[in-house]
Image (tube, helix red, strand yellow):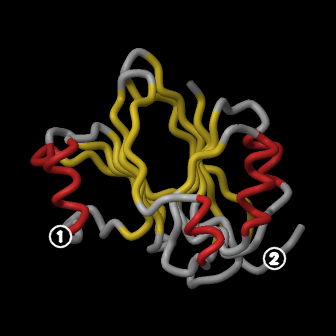
Amino acid sequence: MKIGLISDTHSFFDSRILKYFENVDEIWHAGDIGDISILEKLQKIKPTKAVFGNIDALNIQMATQENLIFDCEGIKVFITHIGGNFEKFPTRVQKIIKNEKPNLYICGHSHIVKVRTIPEWNNLICINPGAAGNEGFHQTKTIMTFEINNRKLEKLLLIELGKRGKID
């Protein structure tokens, strides 16, 4: 299963996303979609799972959820928008991780690309794909792709879409 991972679009759709996500099986959006048209564009590319973020209006909140917990190829996945810096999770997230025991945790919000395995949380793999939109303090727009094969996360690729604010 090949996944396209995106977050923090903030109402901006970079057309290069089409190229990088054309061969994925699913797209996962970790919140701050910004405009419902972004979600609709992603859904036209591939099936899309998405959570809402702190900037998302009611129409996006009604089309998504705050938290997604699901199985993908034998890996239990937990996606939420505001998830901490992986050094310390917010209390809400800690409770969900303790109760659900996911293998893969994905969040957005910080606009900072980060991938980390946390041994004290049963080797939980944590991913924040950075931000694909033009709003925020990040310098470079980013997305990711990865594969889940035989209960393993493989071929994680960070894709830079160019400088924030620049439209190619």
Which mark, residue 35?
none
Residue wearing tag 1: 91
Residue closest to the eye, 112 or 39: 39
- Label 2 neighbour load within 10 Å: few <14, some 14-19, many 20+: few
Q: Is residue 18 left or right of residue 24?
A: right
Tag 2: amino acid: Lys
Residue 147 percent across, percent down from the top left: 53, 29
Residue closest to the eye, 48 or 138: 48
Q: Quadrant of residue 86?
A: bottom left
Q: Which one is closest to the eye, mark 1 or mark 2?
A: 1
Q: Is residue 2 above or below residue 141?
A: above
Residue 1 percent across, percent down from the top left: 56, 24
Image point 54% across, 35% down: which residue? 146
Residue wearing tag 2: 166
Q: Is residue 29 above or below residue 167?
A: above
Q: Is residue 90 left or right of residue 158?
A: left
**Secondary structure at numbered mark 1:** helix
- Label 1 neighbour load within 10 Å: few <14, some 14-19, many 20+: few
Q: Quadrant of residue 138?
A: bottom right
| Residue at the right extreme, as displayed | 168
